[in-house]
Image (cartoon, rainbow, N blue to C red):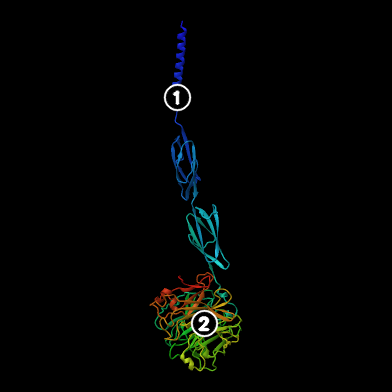
């Protein structure tokens, strides 16, 4: 039998062993417990925007994971959201729990710049994706060119080419597009009424034509050979035709005439004149084709044998030539228009050397009857009035329905005038017409003269600024009578265009346009001058421009004037003019 003390001892030891067993058991369990891990998930938004790496993974608690976002083409990485924030493409994520991070991508955006040339607008319609100041890459935009009234859309240039309208463009980079609009002036409607019944009315004019090339000629700075030209309607289509003459003003040899139809030389023949100085264009016989009046001086030096005036009648079967009047003279200018308001064209040639030679002492007029024949009569203009008037035009400038006469030539006084039998008039002036072939000689309207630029080579009358008032455009070259008639840099050299406004019976000068600054310092040029100015909208902006022309200025083969090829004066929005150069 076990004693009480021994029993208690055994019991105590059993409890101690049990405690130690449990302790050891717990300690061993802690030593073998697994490490805690967390899950990282990374995704792209939108899925097509790019990729992320890694897309998922398991990390122990406290680990730092690096996630990188890589955008696809035409996307950029924007920011991280979810379990982490930031805008760097690579981000560190501390794994203290399960994390889900999102890489946010956005479409690249590009600007679309629209430029307007002319008058009109461009509407932008998004065909795919949303409209914004800048377009998301891949956006398809439909562009529609909307011309302003009177204008027409011509073409797209820049990052879009062609003339299709509307058209579409895909925005995959910064793009710039220009929409070009043009205004096509109706030159047939610039004048109305009686102003269409004049040789001044020339709706077929086109600038920058190489006249020498048209007739296979070469121009030269030497001698007195000049190619004169004028446009007209010589067949049954709307292609401008042109008549030209080439003659040597220092000889009595007959010049040569050329008629170009549809840009091809159709007729060439010996002229009845030695020097044709001006063409008057109009449908004299009313057969639907323009006819050509030849105004000629003959040899431009002693013995001044002169030329008579002729008419070239055009028809659908060719041409015929008739002498208007057998009187020969120094016909440097002339004009044609309906002087007696009967609806037919009348011709008024000016024999500048006719004073004290003829009876009656009056400039003749040839009244047409619309069939191609004329009746000779006389104006009330005495010859001494036109002795210095080498340029002339008919135009109803005061809008009373009667054609008025503007005349000018060499604007300076000379000693021999004092001994002349009658007063020699040399001031440029407007003489108001009376509607019966006579003019108000007592109340002429004087044109301001320009010192040093007294040689007038052309007159034009247009409403340049569309204000309802006529502008008179006077083409001038240098000369004041103090030296030789033709002298380098001093006479018959250079360009000056005088623009005057006629309003309320008075004229006022509004513009004076000079030649390019290098004109007189150009040692290659000798006595270069414009014999006419065309009025034409070169850049088709709806404003009339001024183009000084001559056979030399227009000739691509004439090297002395090469620096001024394509010269014109572009009218700006404020009515001023700027020198420009046209290139074909």
Identify the residue shown where x is 50% and y is 75%.
546
- Labels 2 & 1 near each other (Cβ < 8 A): no
The answer to whether residue 244 shows anywhere in this view is: no
Q: Position of residue 252 (x, y in %)?
A: 43, 88
Q: Position of residue 534 (x, y in %)?
A: 50, 76
121 above or below 288? above
Q: Residue furthest front?
A: 5
Q: Residue furthest left?
A: 523
Q: Quadrant of the C terminus?
A: bottom left
Label 1 CA crowd tier, 10 Å (few <14, some 14–19, many 20+): few
Q: Position of residue 327 (x, y in %)?
A: 51, 91
Q: Earlier in the sequence, mark 2 or mark 1?
A: 1
The answer to whether residue 416 shows anywhere in this view is: yes
Q: Position of residue 362 (x, y in %)?
A: 54, 91
The quadrant in which residue 61 appears is top left
Label 2 CA crowd tier, 10 Å (few <14, some 14–19, many 20+): some
Q: Is residue 283 left or right of residue 548?
A: right
Label 1 sits on a secondary structure element that is helix
Residue 179 is tagged as none
Label 2 sits on a secondary structure element that is loop
Pick whichever, 32 or 171, lies toward us: 32
Residue 448 is tagged as 2
Pick whichever, 270 or 297, lies toward us: 297
Q: Please tell me how many numbered marks the rendered image carries.
A: 2
Label 2 vs label 1: CA separation? 121 Å
Identify the residue position indicated by label 1 in the image.
29
């Amino acid at each position: 039998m076990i004693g009480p003390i021994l029993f208690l001892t055994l019991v105590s030891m059993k409890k101690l062993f049990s405690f130690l067993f449990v302790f050891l058991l717990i300690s061993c369990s802690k030593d073998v417990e697994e490490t805690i891990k967390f899950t990282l998930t990374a995704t792209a938004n939108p899925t097509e925007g790019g990729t992320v790496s890694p897309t998922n993974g398991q990390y122990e608690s406290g680990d730092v994971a690096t996630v990188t976002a890589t955008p696809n083409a035409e996307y950029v990485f924007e920011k991280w959201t979810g379990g982490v924030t930031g805008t760097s493409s690579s981000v560190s994520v501390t794994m203290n729990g399960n994390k889900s991070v999102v890489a946010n991508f956005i479409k690249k955006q590009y600007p679309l710049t629209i430029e307007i040339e002319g008058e009109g607008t461009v509407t932008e319609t998004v065909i795919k994706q949303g409209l914004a100041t800048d377009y998301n890459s891949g956006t398809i935009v439909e562009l529609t060119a909307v011309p302003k009234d009177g204008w027409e859309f011509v073409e797209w240039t820049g990052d879009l080419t062609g003339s299709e309208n509307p058209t579409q463009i895909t925005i995959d980079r910064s793009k710039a597009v220009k929409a070009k609009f043009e205004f096509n002036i109706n030159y047939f409607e610039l004048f109305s009424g009686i102003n269409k019944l004049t040789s001044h009315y020339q709706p077929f004019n086109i600038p920058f034509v190489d006249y020498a090339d048209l007739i296979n000629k070469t121009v030269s700075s030497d001698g007195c050979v000049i190619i004169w030209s004028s446009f007209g309607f010589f067949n049954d289509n709307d292609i401008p035709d042109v008549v030209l003459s080439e003659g040597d003003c220092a000889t009595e040899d007959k010049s040569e005439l050329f008629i170009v139809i549809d840009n091809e030389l159709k007729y060439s023949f010996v002229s009845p004149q030695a020097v044709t100085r001006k063409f008057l264009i109009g449908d004299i016989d009313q057969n639907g084709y323009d006819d050509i009046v030849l105004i000629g001086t003959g040899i431009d030096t002693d013995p001044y044998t002169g030329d008579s005036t002729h008419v070239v009648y055009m028809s659908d079967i060719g041409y015929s030539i008739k002498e208007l009047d057998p009187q020969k003279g120094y016909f440097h200018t002339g004009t044609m228009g309906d002087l007696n308001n009967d609806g037919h064209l009348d011709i008024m040639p000016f024999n500048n050397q006719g004073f004290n030679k003829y009876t009656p002492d009056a400039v003749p007029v040839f009244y047409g009857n619309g069939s191609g024949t004329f009746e000779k009569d006389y104006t009330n203009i005495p010859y001494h009035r036109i002795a210095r008037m080498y340029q002339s035009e008919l135009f109803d400038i005061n809008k009373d329905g009667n054609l008025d006469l503007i005349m000018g030539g060499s604007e300076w006084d000379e000693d021999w005038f004092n001994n002349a039998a009658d007063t020699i008039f040399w001031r440029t002036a407007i003489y108001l017409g009376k509607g019966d072939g006579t003019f108000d000689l007592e109340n002429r309207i004087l044109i301001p003269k320009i010192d040093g630029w007294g040689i007038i080579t052309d007159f034009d009358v247009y409403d340049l600024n569309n204000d309802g008032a006529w502008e008179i455009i006077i083409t001038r070259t240098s000369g004041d009578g103090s030296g030789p008639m033709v002298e380098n840099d001093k006479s018959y050299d250079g360009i000056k265009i005088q623009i005057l406004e006629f309003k309320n019976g008075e004229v006022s000068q509004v513009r004076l346009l000079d030649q390019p600054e290098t004109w007189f310092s150009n040692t290659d040029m000798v006595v270069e001058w414009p014999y006419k100015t065309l009025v034409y909208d070169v850049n088709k902006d709806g404003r009339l421009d001024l183009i000084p022309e001559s056979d030399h200025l227009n000739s691509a083969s004439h090297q002395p004037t090469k620096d001024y090829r394509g010269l014109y004066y572009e009218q700006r929005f404020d009515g001023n003019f700027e020198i420009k150069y046209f290139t074909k």
